[in-house]
Image (cartoon, helix red, strand yellow):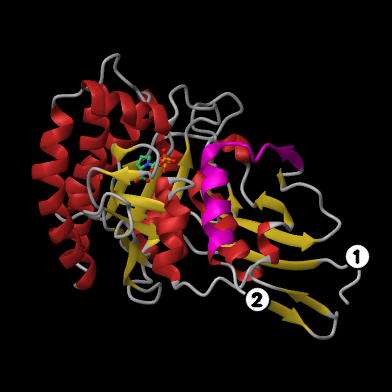
Amino acid sequence: ESGKSWVLAVTAQTPTNIAVIKYWGKRDEELILPINDSISVTLDPDHLCTTTSVAVSPAFTHDRMWLNGKEVSLSGGRYQNCLRELRSRASDVEDEQKGIKITKKDWEKLHVHIVSYNNFPTAAGLASSAAGLACLVFSLAKLMNVKDDHSRLSAIARQGSGSACRSLYGGFVKWIMGKEENGSDSIAVQLADEKHWDDLVIIIAVVSSRQKETSSTSGMRETVETSMLIEHRAKEVVPKRIVKMEEAIKNRDFPAFARLTCADSNQFHAVCLDTSPPIFYMNDTSHRIISCVEKWNRSEGTPQVAYTFDAGPNAVLISHNRKAAALLLQRLLFYFPPQADADLNSYVIGDKTI
Ligand code: 2P0
């Protein structure tokens, strides 16, 4: 007889990911199915990541969640879709030491508590839902003894937040848009593991810690509804770039990788500008960083650094190696000297803030 007061818990850690070929636009809002494939690099788990503990107990009367110490509602459709998918795939769990036995059927009635922390300042505007939703799905899958592989789990994480499906793997990851109406083939696959190209150094320049004005979810909806360029991007441009990016990653071809990454970031921001009303995620400082990197890359003859910007003004700078990263930092500090009221007030290199 498993008493009334046991608790069974699991903790997991998931890094965030940065897209080098961007996801922007859905063909199905409910299932979160994209209009093009995307490719990302998963950051080192020591740095920008989410840690999530999930627990189950017969004493719990509701599913509840705390994010960075504050309770948040789980009533949203996306959380509910993830929880329903996981419960339907749960298996028997037995912990002999604790005298706990949970059957597949029990999971329909048992409630879970979820406690999640980001190890990076949420206020820095880097709080991506990618790490959070991936971690939630992964930790609950462990707790509930869900036997699906990472790709199947990625399809569940996708229903929490599109970009989350890419955080189930380290290294370089492709989110395949898929063809099926039910989304069963819209999954993430690993292109190369974290050891494949480990001389790359990623520097994140925090340009502004303000919350973005247009959320990704509503921004991409407006783009799909109003932009004339987005269809050309999704159907003509991205499929070719995906092939070239896979080649560049396979061959560790930094010049090709950098050109594709910068071009795709710029096109993503161009379709944002082509949206009505236009969406501006980058600001003057972001533009100055682009000019600075472009100028340097041109003066070197071959690209040393790639830049990419998501739905906000912060720059993600991917350097060819440690030497290029050190020179980049020097330049950033020269052109954007840190001062109390500067736009660009901190450079985060992993966990080191200067
Ligand atoms: C990406 N972004 O590929 C792109 C590039 C932002 C710019 O995925 O509605 O939070 O939850 O699927 O995943 C941000 O969008 O949006 C994003 P939903 P999500 O990383």
Front residue of 38 and 120:
38
**Label 1 sits on residue:** 4
Which residue shows up at 49% across the image and 32% down it?
344
Answer whether residue 74 is magenta in the image.
Answer: yes
In the picture as drawn, the residue positioned furthest to the top comes out as 277
Which residue shows up at 39% across the image and 77% down it?
195
- Residue 242 x %, y %: 18, 56
- Give the mark, 2 or 1, whose residue is nearer the N terminus: 1
At label 2, which amino acid type do we have?
Answer: Asp
- Residue 309 x %, y %: 35, 39
- Quadrant where the N terminus sits is bottom right
Which residue shows up at 36% across the image and 31% down it?
286
Q: Quadrant of ligand 1?
A: top left
At label 1, which amino acid type do we have?
Answer: Lys
Front residue of 143 and 251:
143
Residue 227 picture quarter: top left
Q: Can residue 339 be seen in this snapshot?
A: yes
Q: Which mark is residue 92?
A: 2
- Crowd around label 1: few <14 · some 14–19 · many ≥20 (10 Å): few
| Span shown in magenta | 70-88
Q: Can residue 256 be seen in this snapshot?
A: no
Taking 340 as reference, is 71 above or below it? Answer: below
Q: Secondary structure at mark 1?
A: loop
- Crowd around label 2: few <14 · some 14–19 · many ≥20 (10 Å): some
